[in-house]
Image (cartoon, rainbow, N blue to C red):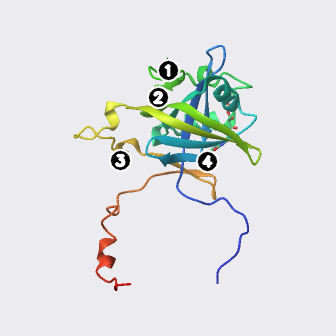
Amino acid sequence: MRKNFGKKAILAPLPVLIVATYDENGTPDAMNAAWGGQCSAHHVALNLAMEHKTTENLLKKKAFTLSIAGADNLVLSDYFGLVSGHEANKMEAAGVHVSKSAFVDAPVIEEYALTLECRVVSMEQRLGEMYVLGEVINMQADESILDDRGRVDLDKLKPLSFDSSARTYRVLGPTVGTAFKDGEQLVAREKPL
Ligand SMILES: Cc1cc2nc3c(=O)[nH]c(=O)nc-3n(C[C@H](O)[C@H](O)[C@H](O)COP(=O)(O)O)c2cc1C
């Protein structure tokens, strides 16, 4: 038996992305975004509500940083998703360390070990929300999450995932296979078309 649920948001894993921006006075803000991700080799996409301070800032500054939250960032990241920059200075309240990106007009939050520095390519209003396409200009990573070959090690970062079904945060699990390789065992069973 299979049960029908109608329209339901369930795709997993959803990332926990922290979008950081400056407003016109140079005050930094950050929000939590799960409806987003990598959409090509050098581009990321976000789906943001119109009323967010972040959306307002993006329209003005056309730049943002996108941090990938790790397990160590859980409380901070949830806070960024609970309160709006229209109501409070979240950076100040959270006591985070912020510096200006050397590549784009956007803040880097030093508590996050992995951050993409992005420029806005386009912002389009669709279905009542703002679809943002960003180009990744630079990726910066703290040495603490690099492996011995200097690559980002996700086992060290422990990226958080938002479980929209249970409304919880989970951590990315262990490596269980090799991409573009493990399917090869079925290639041997192919019959000529
Ligand atoms: C787990 C989680 C995921 C979220 N994902 C999104 C999202 O993808 N898009 C969005 O517009 N808001 C999302 N939100 C809500 C915003 O983060 C929240 O409204 C925030 O206060 C907006 O901040 P700002 O007004 O300072 O920009 C999410 C919140 C949480 C807790």
Mark 4 surroundings: few (<14), some (14-19) or many (≥20) residues within 10 A: some
Relative to 162, is 129 on the left or the right?
right
Mark on residue 35?
4
Residue 124 place in picture, x, y as percent = 68, 40
Residue drawn 74% across and 25% down? 87
Report the amino acid beneath label 4: Trp
Residue type at mark 1: give it.
His
Q: Quadrant of residue 85?
A: top right
Q: Earlier in the sequence, mark 1 or mark 2?
A: 1
- Disc 4 versus disc 3: nearer the observer: 4
Check disc 1 and report the residue beneath it.
Answer: 97
Whichever of callouts 3 and 2 sits on the residue coming sooner in the sequence is 2
Query: Is residue 79 shown to the viewer in this render?
Result: no
Asked if ligand 1 lies within 8 A of label 4, the reply is: yes
Q: Tell us which disc is closer to us: 2 or 4.
A: 4
Q: Are marks 1 and 2 in contact (CB under 8 Å)?
A: yes
Amino acid at circle 2: Glu
Query: 10 Å neighbourhood of mark 1: few (<14), some, or many (≥20)?
Result: few
Location of residue 129 in the rendering, given as x and y in whole percent from the top left corner: 73, 43
Q: Secondary structure at mark 4?
A: loop
Q: Residue furthest top?
A: 25
Q: Name the residue beneath numbered marker 2.
A: 111
Q: Amino acid at mark 3?
A: Asp
Secondary structure under badge 3?
Answer: helix
**Is the shortest distance between ligand 1 and the CB of mark 1 under 8 Å?**
no
Image position of 23 (left or right of 101): right
Q: Are marks 1 and 3 in contact (CB under 8 Å)?
A: no
Q: CA distance from mark 2 to mark 4?
A: 22 Å
The residue tagged 3 is 155
Examine the image and state in which quarter residue 95 appears: top right
Please name the residue shown 57% across and 34% down the image: 121
